[in-house]
Each structure stands twice: as structure tokens, then as C-alpha cells.
Image (cartoon, helix red, strand yellow):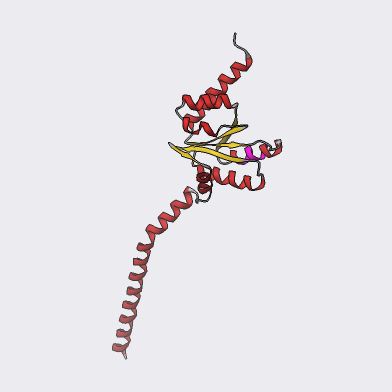
Amino acid sequence: MKKVGLLVKEISERQIKSRLKGSDSFIIVKYSGLSSPDMTSLRQSLKGANTNFFVVKNSVARRALKDSGLETVIKAIEGPCGFIFVKEEPVETSKILCDFQKGHEKLVLEAGMFKDKVLEKSDIIALSKLPSKDVLRAQVVGTLNAPIRGLVMVLNGTLKKFVICLDQIKKKKTS
């Protein structure tokens, strides 16, 4: 029969591996010095962005990352670290983290992964400054719509001038 501590480590490792498979990206943060209410506040704000904050022992995290073929981010795991697993787009999550970090300097962004690309701290901050996917889509649609709208306005102006011209001819002939 296995010891409880060993069982907990195995379960944690399985959870990390399954979350790595179910997430497009993840971010590693250091949370040392954050109070319990601050951690709760961070978890709640991240939950709204469809992300999970997961704290695990470093040895378990390193083993799970190594088994998943993500050795490039193992160096970021030093001291009390937490994983933030992002299921959708990382822009909203990085905005939440950067906003939270402004009021809580003890939260430190370490590294992360997006698809197959390693994210450094500067990359995460750059992601937080991007507009959301919906805003980008609206900008693309607006850009594609602009030439068509311009053509419609030009044609509308030409038709207006033509109608005014016909009206003037009509008035001349009737007078």
C-alpha cells in the first residue's frame, strides 16, 4: 500500500499532465508573499477568464513538464510557483495577471507556453497589451468594409447629382 504523500504527488502529476493536454497555453507565476485573500481574489478573477490556477510541489511540476516534453520551461520553476492553465486565448488572462500585479508586486510572472512557443515575462506583458480576439475581428471586418462603403457613398452621390440634374431639366422645360 502506498503512502498518502506519494498518492497525492501522483494525482497532482496526473492533473498537471491532463491540464497541459487540455490547455492551449499556460503561465508560471511566483506567488510567495501573497495573502490568502489576495490569492482568492486572483483565483476568482482568473475563473472569469476560463482559466485555472493550480499550485503544486516543484518536483511534481518538473516531472510532469519533463514527461510532457516541455523541458524548456522547467528552469522557471524555482520557489513557490503556480500554474495558470489557459483554455482559450491567453490575452485576457495576461491582462488579468498584469492588472493584478500592479496592485500586488509579490506576484511575479515567470514564463509560459503558448501552443509550442515559450513565453518570457516580456512576451506575457506584450500579450496583455493586445486587444481581445473579438476586437481584432471587428477591426478586420471594418477594414474590409471600408472600401465597399466608400464605393457605395460615391455611387450614392453620383445618383443624387443625376436626380438633381434631371429635376433641373424638368424645371427648364416646364417654364
The image shows residue 141 at horizontal and vertical percentages of 41, 55
Q: Which residue of the protein is positioned furthest toward the top in this rendering?
A: 1
The image shows residue 156 at horizontal and vertical percentages of 35, 71
Compared across the picture, whether 119 is left or right of 160 comes to right
Quadrant, the C terminus: bottom left
Q: Which of the two residues, 167 or 135, is positioned nearer the viewer here?
A: 135
Quadrant, the N terminus: top right
- Magenta-highlighted residues: 40-45
Compared across the picture, whether 5 is left or right of 23 comes to right
Q: Is residue 87 magenta?
A: no
Q: Main secondary structure of the magenta part?
A: helix
Write down the quadrant of residue 94 in the picture. top right
For image coordinates 59% across by 43% down, the residue present is: 97
Q: How many marks?
A: 0
Q: Is residue 41 magenta?
A: yes
Q: Which of the two residues, 10 or 118, is positioned nearer the viewer here?
A: 118
Write down the quadrant of residue 151 in the picture. bottom left
Q: Which residue of the protein is positioned furthest toward the bottom in this rendering?
A: 175
The image shows residue 21 at horizontal and vertical percentages of 47, 29
The image shows residue 69 at horizontal and vertical percentages of 44, 28
